[in-house]
Amino acid sequence: MILFKKIERDSADKETLAVVERFIQEKAFQSHKSAPPPLPTVVVYAQDEESGVVLGTMGLDMPKNRALTLATHWDVPLDGDIERFVQIGRWFVDKEKAPKHLAAAILYPAPLVSVMYEKNEWICELKEKVFDRFAYYGCEPCRVDQGTIKLENIPAEGLPYYQDGQTIICTMSIDVVLLAVKKYIVSDGAIQLD
């Protein structure tokens, strides 16, 4: 069975935090040839109950009294209170080891954690194919077309992610995401397989 867990960046469980961070770093280099940004506030991760192996992650950054992390390198006009946003990222799945639909299934606990922090909307920077994946799952991502990237503010090890010019900003309602991905979870918390 797959267990869904969360770990906070400031967790005392440094061993688990290191395993989760290593998984994210490996997947970022495999997928984007780029270093990921520092760990977010919380990481929701999927773990195989028997082996303990991390199979997938979703990062949730919840700024409190500070700007969104993406504001350091994007000029993005946002309406209203930015405190309503959770910046998501680091959505990675081990495609060789993970069961089918894990990418969708991990989207279910991630918004639940967001709601625990009294947030109601996601914002993220992502590639076009990831935008399409969110749309396929029924999450209704909305583009933020006015965003302008400031490449000069990105550390050199993170630049490869942005150099193809295909990175976009989008927002999603947490309520819509929850409803969309609920079909991938069965009542006992296991992953729904077709």
Image (cartoon, helix red, strand yellow):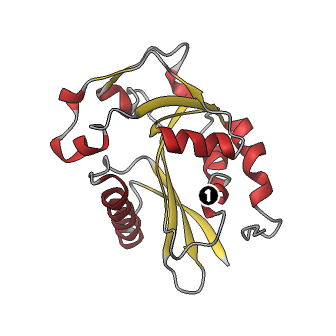
Count of marks, rendered view: 1
x and y percent of residue 71 in the render?
35, 26
Q: Which part of the image, by quadrant, shows the C terminus? A: bottom right
In the picture, measured across the screen, residue 190 lies left or right of residue 107, that is: right
The answer to whether residue 129 is above or below residue 66 is below
The residue that disc 1 covers is: 106
Residue at 31 percent across and 38 percent down: it is: 164
Foreground pick, 142 / 117: 142
x and y percent of residue 36 in the render?
32, 50
Judged from this view, the residue extending furthest toward the right is 187
Q: Which part of the image, by quadrant, shows the N terminus? A: bottom right
The answer to whether residue 41 is above or below residue 43 is above
x and y percent of residue 113 in the render?
61, 49
The answer to whether residue 123 is above or below residue 145 is below
Judged from this view, the residue extending furthest toward the bottom is 50
Residue at 40 percent across and 34 percent down: it is: 167
In the picture, measured across the screen, residue 92 lies left or right of residue 46, that is: left
Asked where in the image residue 75 lies, by quadrant, the reply is top left
x and y percent of residue 137 in the render?
69, 47
The amino acid beneath tag 1 is Ile
Residue at 58 percent across and 41 percent down: it is: 132
Q: Secondary structure at mark 1?
A: loop
* Disc 1 crowd, CA 10 A, few/some/many (<14, 14-19, 20+): many
